[in-house]
Amino acid sequence: MTAFATLRRAGVLATALVALASGVLATGPARAEVPEVHISKGYGILYLPMIVMEHEKLLEKQAKAAGLGDVKVGWLELDGGNVINDAMISGNLDIAAIGVPGFLTLWAKVKGNAKLEVSGLAGLSATSLYLNTNNPNIKSLKDFTAKDKIALPGIKTSLSAVVLQMAVAKEFGDDNYAKLDPMTVGLPHPEAYTALVSGKTEVNSHLGSPPYSFMELENPQVHRVMNSVDVLGNISLDLVYAPKRFIDANPKLTAAFLSALEEADKLIADEPARAATIYVQSAKAKLSAEEVERMIKDPDTKFSTTPNGVMQFANFMGRVGSIKTKPATWQDLFIANVHSLSGS
């Protein structure tokens, strides 16, 4: 058991003992919804709504408005679909922000298992992913060789990994979708950025998101090979999800989370300068608020609870065999609260 899980179990036990001592368990009704929730976010502009939600304590605000009292919110920073999904399955997370492919991988894997099934709560964000390199000989996907190393958060199932596979499939055909997989190495975006701009490691390429993709191009030795928007269009890249058991047991908290997410999106849209300042205060990247604001206002960057284009990922992953169970519609992946949105 991890230290995080041990602390969590200890906290639950302590709460139960206090309630027993006061006679609550013997004479009063049990609390219907959890008083504490654990949420993960990742690195970069894609996670800005979650960063704003944490900084402004929007979930705490919406939970109190829903009559849930003082809900405690614990935040973790995780990168890569495999890492996030492992944390979810192990019980260390209640809600997670993740790349769409990582979610689809877990959704398909646990479909039909009532104890482990997951559901999407809402879309999160869309932006461009840049494949950047410091190798002057690489001008297109056709120029990569076995000597090149492409950094991305997690091999095979992370957002960047599957976007790369989709681009490769478009260039070389579905049968060759994994052609560049042997060249990929798993690194969180901040570490990949450092490796690429230093030019001192085997990693000479990185498929990343803002701010890291933008920052890399400030180095004269780095150039862009591909923009994901040119391959996929401007679709949702990240979403938020939770175990179905958690959602069913906590309908008010789930609704409060969605309200908090919509409030975060509104703040970003109405006050991009303020959102940029929040990002700078929260993130590890050395950027000015003005630089971040420009990234937020980039035409390829959008923040919305509407899941847009998730079936594009699902259809590809089902077609090449990355997932064995494919949803018939995008609504199959998400809770009923968002079914009326114009998703795809």
Image (spheres, rainbow, N blue to C red):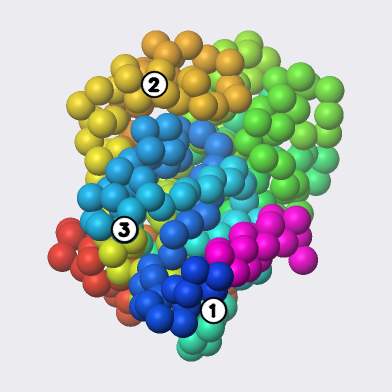
The image shows residue 22, relative to residue 126, as above or below, that is: below
Report whether 66 appears left or right of 91.
left
Report whether 12 appears left or right of 122.
right
* Nearest to the observer: residue 127 or residue 312: 127
* Nearest to the observer: residue 17 or residue 45: 17
Disc 1 or 2, which lies upstream in sequence? 1
* Nearest to the observer: residue 140 or residue 114: 114
Disc 3 or 1, which lies upstream in sequence? 3
* Tag of residue 28: none
SS at mark 1 in the image: loop
How far from the left and from the top, in percent, is residue 203?
A: 77, 34
Dot 3 and dot 2 residues touching (CB under 8 Å): no
**Mark 3 Cα shell of 10 Å, populated few (<14), some (14-19), many (≥20):** some
Q: Which residue is mark 1?
A: 116
| Eye-nearest disc, 3 or 2 | 3
| Eye-nearest disc, 3 or 1 | 3
Which quarter of the picture shows residue 27? bottom left
On the question of residue 22 being in view, the answer is yes
Find the distance from the CA under tag 3 to the CA under tag 2: 30 Å
- Dominant secondary structure, magenta: helix
What segment carries the magenta color?
1-18
**Mark 1 Cα shell of 10 Å, populated few (<14), some (14-19), many (≥20):** some
